[in-house]
Amino acid sequence: MIRGESKKVEFKEVRPEKSIKYIKSVVAFANSTGGTIIFGVADETREIVGIPDEIVFSEMDAIANAISDSCAPMIVPDIYFKTVDGKILIIVDVPIGSMRPYYIKNVGIEEGTYIRVSGSSRPADDYMIHELRLEGSRRSYDEMPCLDIAITESDIEKLCEDMTQIAMQNCKSDEERNNIKPVGVNQLLAWGILLERDGKFLPTNAYAILTGNERMPVAIQCGVFKGSTKAIFVDRTEFTGSAWETVEDAYRYVLKNIHLGAKFEGIYRQDVYEIPPSAIRELIVNAVVHRSYLDHNCIQVAIYDDRLEILSPGKLPKGQTLEKMQEGHSKIRNEALAKAFSYMKIIEHWGSGILRVIQEVENTGLKKPVFSDGEIDVIVTIYRDENSPASNLMDIPKDQDMNQDATKEVPKKFQRSSEEVPKKLTEQQKVIYDIILESGEVKAKEVAGVLNVSDRRARTILNEMIDAGVVEKIGATTSTRYVLVERKN
């Protein structure tokens, strides 16, 4: 009461003659995260005026009857009275509904469905009503058929191959890599990425999202802004493609536009970013997996002078709260997509991602990330700090390529003796050679990540290796990959 009205609390000084004035709040609470209406408190001043003793029980009956008669499906709140400062208040606790959407009967589902936004109850739009229907039927939108696209057997085979390849690339050890089982049609069916009807395979929305089909809103909009508002933008771009490609593109974009420091040990350098890269990646992955794809807005990644913001379209799913999320409670909105990301090892452990983000950010010396539930979206904010460890080390220009004598420290699994690689290769090319020797192939974007150079520079280095007769390019456009010439077959 001291804090005033909120998403979960509403005051009424008296029971209104027209019940719709509080019934819409009952409906909104049931469609959102539950809430409480307190009768006997002035909503503007928060003064406790109370309910006269002689009408308390009749008022409680009138409220119960109005809710029963007006709401569909039926809502059964807990109605009781409580004495505060010698005055009686009537408390109406509305639980989270399990049969959504709830609406006002005589208005109808299209006009009578309400949701709770900040401290008020507002009509739900078409997208939100559809979202509520899915929650009420316990269905996942990404598992529903996407009838607008047609697929062939080769399309399915390519997705299986791509997912298997990504999973292999994300393994951290040979033992882990040996345990990867190639994805097949049966697995896609089990995950809900495909459906089978009348002997034919149909794509679901998850299939469209994973493959970057234009019928689904999978773009991530990224921008850099001067100051702390969007009034002046420095750069902005939009990434499209497969779900894992957009994650990687957005992740690399952020790294290129935040502070980077470095410390050297011998000829090797260790990069230190002002914001932990793993935290950045986790938040972008979280936005892609848990966003509402019924909302056609894009994920937005905004870099300001003082903060990084990642916006995920859609309100929190049923039963989830910001508090639960920060405690490690995971509520999956897109189950098929989550299973695919888990297989590809883009998601590591359920429920631990946000906890790791908070810990990593705080360990860097930054403030705890701020999680906010907007009217139609969820925003995570990480505040930047000029005194972060990255700022106290030697600054590295984002577009500066590493010279041939001072490469980024290579992961141990790629380190080999100099006798195992061609003598004519530069230090950077030796790193690439070792990666291909370990994994069988490599993409330009992976090279850019390991060497910490631009995508263009990565392709230049690879072309030099082609000219030297060491590697060969296979495929075209986004499927282009590079293999060792002697390992082509």
Image (cartoon, rainbow, N blue to C red):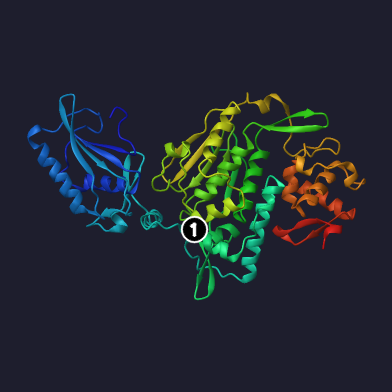
Residue drawn at point x = 58 percent, y = 45 percent: 348
Amino acid on which disc 1 is placed: Asp
Which residue shows up at 66% across the image and 39% down it?
A: 255
Nearest the camera: 143 or 405?
A: 143
Image x and y of residue 125, in percent: 37, 54
If the image is split into quadrants, where does the C terminus sit?
bottom right
Please identify the residue farthest to the left as the structure is shown.
54
Q: Quick check: 489 above or below 367? A: below
| Residue 256 in the figure: left or right of residue 45 | right
Residue at image coords 77%, 36%: 409
Percent position of residue 265, x then y: 79, 28
Left or right: residue 359 versus residue 270 is left
Q: Residues within 10 Å of mark 1 (few under 14, many from 20)?
A: many
For this rendering, which residue is in front, 30 or 195?
A: 195
Q: Please, is residue 269 above or below residue 26 in the view?
A: above
- Residue 439 lies, in percent from the top left, at 75, 52
| Mark 1, residue position | 142
Quarter of the image where one finds residue 51: top left
User: In the rendered image, is residue 116 in sight?
Assistant: yes
Q: How many marks?
A: 1
Q: Is residue 257 left or right of residue 331?
A: right
The residue lying furthest to the right in this view is 423
